[in-house]
């Protein structure tokens, strides 16, 4: 049966997709929803047959999309959150160490090159391709943690919810069991511990304190229905076709699909960020006819207030219930939400249509789906800078080159997107090592075309500590590796 990847608003009980969902790993079309996780990076040895046997055995524990839904329904009915969730993904070197034919390998250029590569040239038109003299993401590889500079063949995610003490013990047990199963075959390179953080409203937040993950594209009927209840679709269509994340698995059968995964360990300088926001607030206050708060300055950087309220819709802290139902049609000149704000850089919501006459479908096809989780200290007001805290960023997409790299290189790291001299994305934008970013332009009056403008540099509060590109194969491929 052929699957139309242009479809959206899919029901998980749709009979036309039962075979596909039983074969597709979970955490792709819908997040796994657990509060704690272990990300286990591993390398394989030279015995290809032993590597395949180990992967086949591990595949029996991997959670399919169908099983994820069954676990979710059981949780709603019984209130128990003790279902272990498991993902398995492979890097290009992982495929090489399995000894399978290259016709079964995913063919994305970035996936094949790996995140540490500095020579591969990528087409990032219409704003020009990157020069192959540094990593296209402008990473400073000297800042990467040592394990991530080594060869990583794959990653396993173990995720669980429930009583925190029991959950931590259970996840550690899973990691230990995986280590034992690898004995004589390969080794664990590094383990990252993830945990969900929430605010007083029980919304998921990241370490700067902002609600996270509210604008992810939606594929399923249940999530689109919830989005409709939470604000509607009048200003923004949150739906996405399956083709945004799903691609045919070249090693599977006709019902086999997978996705490309970008993994980035991002350390956050919480104290430094809010000290800089306080300085920006004071700088704006000197030129404005009102007192600007650090929270408002932070919202200018992110594009949302901490509670998720879009700054393009409201000038002060408040609850608008417009998490995703907004666009920038009434803010075409960036007088409410700056062009350099993180949410505007990563999701222009029609800006490229106005500025470059780009088809809306092209802009929407750049979207990624984020499945990350926080790591480290939960203190949101640390006494020192650069604490062990940040985000284990994970995104899924159908093309690393056309989605993640394009977004990071052509939008976030481009000081001239959306217009000349806009500046970097204040959160994740970065130039090549050794380069100094230009100052961004900030308005002293929300929505006012006559308000004074202030030149102020805001960047450098997120560091990349490592990462890799992966492919999350179908269960058919994993379970049917040759003996």
Image (cartoon, helix red, strand yellow):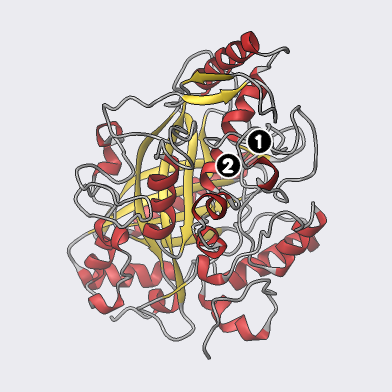
Identify whether 475 is placed above or below 398. Answer: below
The residue tagged 2 is: 343
Identify whether 413 is placed above or below 93. Answer: above
Quick check: 195 left or right of 232?
Answer: left
| Residue 154 on image: x %, y % | 34, 57
Residue at the far top in the pictured view: 286
Residue at the far bottom in the pictured view: 1
Identify whether 428 is placed above or below 365. Answer: above
Label 1 near label 2: C-beta < 8 Å? yes
Quick check: 322 left or right of 374?
Answer: right
Q: Circle 1 sits in a helix, a strand or a loop, which is it? A: loop
The C terminus is located in which quarter? bottom left
| Residue 219 on image: x %, y % | 63, 66
* Residue occupying the point 31% across, 69% down: 107
Can the viewer see residue 176 in this picture? no
Q: Residue 304 carries which label?
A: 1
Q: In which quarter of the image is residue 450?
A: top right
Depth check: give the residue in front, 76 or 394: 394
Q: Which mark is residue 206?
A: none
Q: Circle 2 sits in a helix, a strand or a loop, which is it? A: helix
Depth check: give the residue in front, 461 or 186: 461
Which is nearer the N-term, disc 2 or disc 1?
1
* Residue occupying the point 67% across, 74% down: 10
Q: Residues within 10 Å of mark 2 (few under 14, many from 20)?
A: many
Q: Whole-Å distance between the Cαs marked 2 and 1?
A: 8 Å
* Residue occupying the point 77% across, 57% down: 234
């Amino acid at each position: 049966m052929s699957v139309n990847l242009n479809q959206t608003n899919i029901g998980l009980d749709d009979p036309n997709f039962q075979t596909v969902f039983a074969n597709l790993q979970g955490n792709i079309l819908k997040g796994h929803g657990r509060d704690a996780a272990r990300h286990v990076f591993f390398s394989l040895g030279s015995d290809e047959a032993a590597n395949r046997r180990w992967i086949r055995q591990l595949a029996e524990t991997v959670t399919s999309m169908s099983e994820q839904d069954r676990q979710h329904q059981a949780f709603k009915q019984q209130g128990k959150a003790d279902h272990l969730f498991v993902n398995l993904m492979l890097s290009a070197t992982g495929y090489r160490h399995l000894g399978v034919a290259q016709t079964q390998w995913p063919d994305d250029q970035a996936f094949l090159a790996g995140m540490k590569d500095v020579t591969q040239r990528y087409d990032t038109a219409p704003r020009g391709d990157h020069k192959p003299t540094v990593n296209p993401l402008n990473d400073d590889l000297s800042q990467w943690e040592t394990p991530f500079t080594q060869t990583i063949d794959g990653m396993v995610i173990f995720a669980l919810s429930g009583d925190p003490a029991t959950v931590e013990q259970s996840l550690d047990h899973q990691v230990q069991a995986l280590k034992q199963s690898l004995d004589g075959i390969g080794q664990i390179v590094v383990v990252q511990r993830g945990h969900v953080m929430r605010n007083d409203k029980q919304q998921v937040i990241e370490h700067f304190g902002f609600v996270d993950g509210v604008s992810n594209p939606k594929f399923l009927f249940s999530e689109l229905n919830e989005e409709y209840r939470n604000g509607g679709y009048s200003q923004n269509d949150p739906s996405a076709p399956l083709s945004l994340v799903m691609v045919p698995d070249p090693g599977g059968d006709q019902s086999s699909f997978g996705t490309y995964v970008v993994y980035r360990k991002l350390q956050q300088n919480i104290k430094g960020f809010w000290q800089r926001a306080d300085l920006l607030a004071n700088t704006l206050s000197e030129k404005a006819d009102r007192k600007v708060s650090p929270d408002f300055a932070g919202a200018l950087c992110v594009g949302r207030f901490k509670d998720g309220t879009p700054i393009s819709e409201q000038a002060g802290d408040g609850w608008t219930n417009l998490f995703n139902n907004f666009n920038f049609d009434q803010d075409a000149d960036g007088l409410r939400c700056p062009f350099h704000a993180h949410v505007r850089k990563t999701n222009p919501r029609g800006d490229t249509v106005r500025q470059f006459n780009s088809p809306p479908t092209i802009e929407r096809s750049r979207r990624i789906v984020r499945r990350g989780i926080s790591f480290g200290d939960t203190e949101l007001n640390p006494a020192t800078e650069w604490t062990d805290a940040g985000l284990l960023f994970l995104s899924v997409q159908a093309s690393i080159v056309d989605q993640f790299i394009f977004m990071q290189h052509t939008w976030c790291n481009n000081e001239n997107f959306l217009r000349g001299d806009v500046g970097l994305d204040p959160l994740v934008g970065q130039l090549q090592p050794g380069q100094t970013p230009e100052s961004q332009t900030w308005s002293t009056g929300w929505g006012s075309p006559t308000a004074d403008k202030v030149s102020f540099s805001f960047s450098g509060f997120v560091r990349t500590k490592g990462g890799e590109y992966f492919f999350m194969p179908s269960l058919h491929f994993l379970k049917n590796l040759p003996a």
